[in-house]
Image (spheres, rainbow, N blue to C red):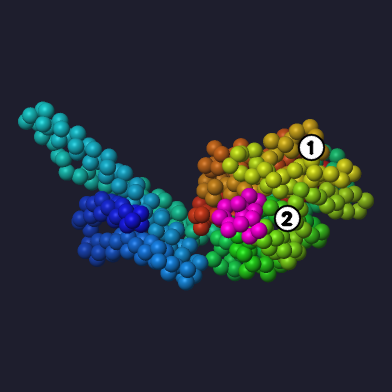
Amino acid sequence: MRSILFIGFLLFLDVYAFQALRLVAVNWPAWLRTSLFSLYWATPVLAVVYLLSAQFGYTENWGKGTVTLLRAFVFIFYLAKFLVASMLIVDDLRRVVLRAYEGLAGPVRFNKGRSVFMAQLGLILAAIPLATLSYGIIRNRHRYQVIRRKIQIPGLSKEFEGLKIIQISDIHSGSFTDKEPVRKAVDLINQEEADLVFFTGDLVNYKAEEALEFVDVFGAIRARKGVYSILGNHDYGDYVRWNNEAEKEQNLNLLFDIHRRMGWNLLRNENELVPFGESNLGVIGVENYSALDRFPKYGDLKKASEGTEGADLKILLSHDPTHWKEQVTADAFKDISLTLSGHTHGMQFGLEIPGWIKWSPAKYMYREWAGLYREADQFLYVNRGLGYLGYPGRVGILPEITVLEFQNA
């Protein structure tokens, strides 16, 4: 019944929004009107086919790429139609008010037909998300950008001068529909010949099995001193209804095994001292810890830091950037020079022009949401993510590979 009601609502939206297109296109060539009308009505056909197929389980046999893209483009087209309908509602309210005024004013008469201007405005508004979100899927979801930053650390040991590390985050392998474009990201990483590669959480969306087919892809990542990783909020299986706790634990153990098979050193509230000449780099990895109540607090920074007292430089891997202000900048952890986080994805939507503007809806949820931040002698870098979640694309905020080089301040 709910599916029927939902389909009925979508069809009503189709019919209602179509009035704007029909009004604007009344004097257009017949071939153009036919083409546009056919495209317009293809959306409800696809939506109904998808909903009914999903209802009866047929989509289980469809390719993941087909389902992902079909669902995304249907959503985009209906978002566009909703914007058209919003303008028509405003116009219809205007017509109602004019009719009511005529009834009171007597002989005064107004044009109560639909406004061509409001129909055009609705179509223009609809074209914005239709164009940008479609472009974000077609062009940007695998358009990896390499962002380079220099980290100037006061009193940096000479062994760490020129140290090059790479950070990646938020792979969300369950969202990928094709392995080949992802291999390009791995090639870009390996071309840097970095000393270390750090992955800061969210290898999967929901279940560990999503990453199985990408073991060979991400297992090809190389660095002189190794690859280190941590868990993100999506890695624990907390967003799945398991039959029992044993099943959830089995899923987590599979994820641990995948990290091992890829050659990644997974740090779970622990650390490792990496020698560089006569100096030691303390790599600290905490489990997910968020200052926001809706995300888990599995991280134990005190436990993770034990044994790093003699490290000459400390780098913390912590998935959620809210952890930085919550604990890392406190007096007890002032010796952690750099924290690497991800989690926000930059909302996969925004506008960035270096030196001019840096904006995303993520800024209203997270104080530190993308890029490099500093407080006294401590730094935080928030990676924009390598993959995507939900919307299978990116608009303005591209998938990121971060290259950080250390210098003495």
Q: Residue at x 10, y 28 (%)?
A: 105
Residue 200: where, in percent of width, then height? 69, 52
In this rendering, position of residue 222 left or right of residue 394 = right
Instruction: State the residue lying farthest toward the top.
Output: 105
In this rendering, position of residue 403 left or right of residue 393 = right
Q: Residue at x 15, y 32 (%)?
A: 100
Q: Is residue 242 magenta?
A: yes
Q: What residue is shown with label 1?
A: 333
What number of labels is visible? 2
Q: Is residue 56 above or below residue 104?
A: below
> SS of the residue at dot 1?
helix
Crowd band around label 1 with a 10 angstrom C-alpha radius: few (<14), some (14–19), many (20+): some
Magenta residues, as a range? Answer: 232-247
Crowd band around label 2 with a 10 angstrom C-alpha radius: few (<14), some (14–19), many (20+): many
Q: Residue at x 33, y 56 (%)?
A: 1
Q: Nearer the viewer, residue 353 or 338?
A: 338
Q: Is residue 204 above or below residue 64?
A: above
In this rendering, position of residue 373 left or right of residue 129 = right
> SS of the residue at dot 2?
strand
Q: Which of the two discs, 2 and 1, labels the residue nearer the N terminus?
A: 2
- Place residue 37 in its image quadrant: bottom left
Residue 210: where, in percent of width, then height? 60, 63
The disc at residue 229 is: 2
